[in-house]
Image: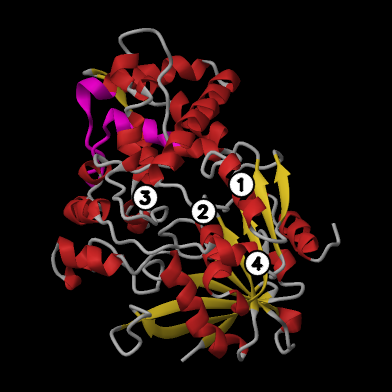
Amino acid sequence: MSVSYRQPGVVLTDRRFAVPLDHDDPAGERIELFAREVVASDKADAELPWLVYLQGGPGFGANRFVGREAWLERALKEYRVLLLDQRGTGASTPANRQTLPLRGGPVEQADYLAHFRADSIVRDCEAIRPEVTGGAPWAVLGQSFGGFCAVTYLSIAPEGLSTAVITGGLPTLDGHADDVYRAAYPRVERKVAAHYARYPQDVDRARRIAEHLLEHEPVLNGGHRLTVEAFQSLGILLGRGDGSHRLHYLLEDAFVRTPQGPALSDAFQEDVRGLLSFAGHPLYALLHEACYDQRERPTAWSAERVRAEFPQFDAAKTLTGDAPVLFTGESVHPWTFDTDPALLPLRDTAEELAARTDWAPLYDPARLAANDVPVAAAIYHDDMYVDTAHSLRTARAIRGLRTWVTDEFEHDGVRAGGPRVLDRLLALTRDEA
């Protein structure tokens, strides 16, 4: 039963759907999906085309907007929007440390989670589209990992799409996770260098914090262990438009004086805990590397293995000299499951996923080369999360795809640029730009 209600300028309807856990076994177990329909108040009774939004991640539910925030302002001028919680996220049969034990042990949990990649998400969309649109194709807006899903959509079910718009989410079509991280570490290093050039005082602050953590390794509220590697992973902020400034403000007041000497302040520790915790999005950690894999070869903790090729990211070695401590970001490591209490019970499940070798292909290069769906993509110059060179190569491989390459925004451009970004991309799909 759907429920409708109002916010400023919009009418919202909460919708739930039942879909197969395994789309190759449609008569088998079913799971529930949640989605929120959004329409402009003055168009609530109008016949409008549909746009389905696929959130970045993996592992994040759709945005919980209030009113006509961000890109919604532009989308609602011509579309009804469906904000889909991808399977396992938000209110769509959430998968986390509390629910996954219902599946059994680590092997059974990993087998279950193998059905939570982009191919299953796209097939979910196709399963619910007839009920939502009456069978008509819909537009898709894919942000980051949602863009990966959009490319999978173009590969396996392009007949379901009228238009595809992708923001910061053109994946490599044939690269292994190792290729992704081998390109990522130099990119992250550039972002860190740019941060330190903007805030040179943060070089000493980061070194001081790292030295303290190597000696003390505090346990944060809720049981999160703040290791030096976990501290370095705060560099994930540097891929966002305001991230460098947020990191600077976080570092500037890290210490307080206590009777026992300098200590990391409660305020700093609480802010860090909120940034590092995977409690709200555990699938990001569990499936992050698997979202790249399409070969009979395990990911085998790719980011951790490749990091060994970049010794400048080893904070303990760095602190023996006078070089700046490098932050990391957009990577998941075995220690992630040892330091975060939301992930600790899933450590063995993560090992099973890292060893898996039977991942199905996510993209069909031949079908993409023959694409006839209007598609446009924003590619952010030196995007920290998605490699620009990989994205441009994929753009050339999708027939008819039009690109907007810009350094005006970071990876979160569709949020920061809002209506303007979506308007530009929709115009590109219509040859209006």
Residue at the top extreme, as displayed: 321
Circle 1 residue: 393
* Cβ atoms at labels 3 and 4 below 8 Å apart: no
Q: Percent position (x, y) of residue 343? A: 24, 52
Q: Nearer the viewer, mark 3 or mark 4?
A: 4
Residue in view at x 22 percent, y 37 percent? 219
Q: Alpha-carbon distance for marks 1 and 4?
A: 16 Å
Circle 2 residue: 173
Circle 4 residue: 370
Amino acid carrying mark 3 in the image:
Glu
* Cβ atoms at labels 3 and 2 below 8 Å apart: no
Q: Alpha-carbon distance for marks 2 and 4?
A: 15 Å
Q: Secondary structure at mark 4?
A: loop
Residue in view at x 45 percent, y 42 percent? 180
Query: Which residues lie in the magenta part?
Result: 213-235
Circle 3 residue: 289
* Cβ atoms at labels 1 and 4 below 8 Å apart: no
Instruction: Answer left or right for 156 relative to 350.
Output: right
| Residue 240 in view, yes or no | no
Q: Nearer the viewer, mark 3 or mark 1?
A: 1
Among numbered discs 2 and 1, the one appearing first in the sequence: 2
Q: Nearer the viewer, mark 3 or mark 2?
A: 2
Amino acid carrying mark 2 in the image:
Leu
Q: Nearer the viewer, mark 1 or mark 4?
A: 4
Residue at the front extreme, as displayed: 366
Among numbered discs 1 and 4, the one appearing first in the sequence: 4
* Cβ atoms at labels 2 and 1 below 8 Å apart: yes
Instruction: Answer left or right for 103 relative to 229.
Output: left
328 above or below 193?
Answer: below
18 above or below 425?
Answer: below
Residue in view at x 41 percent, y 67 percent? 90
Report if residue 216 lies within the magenta region.
yes
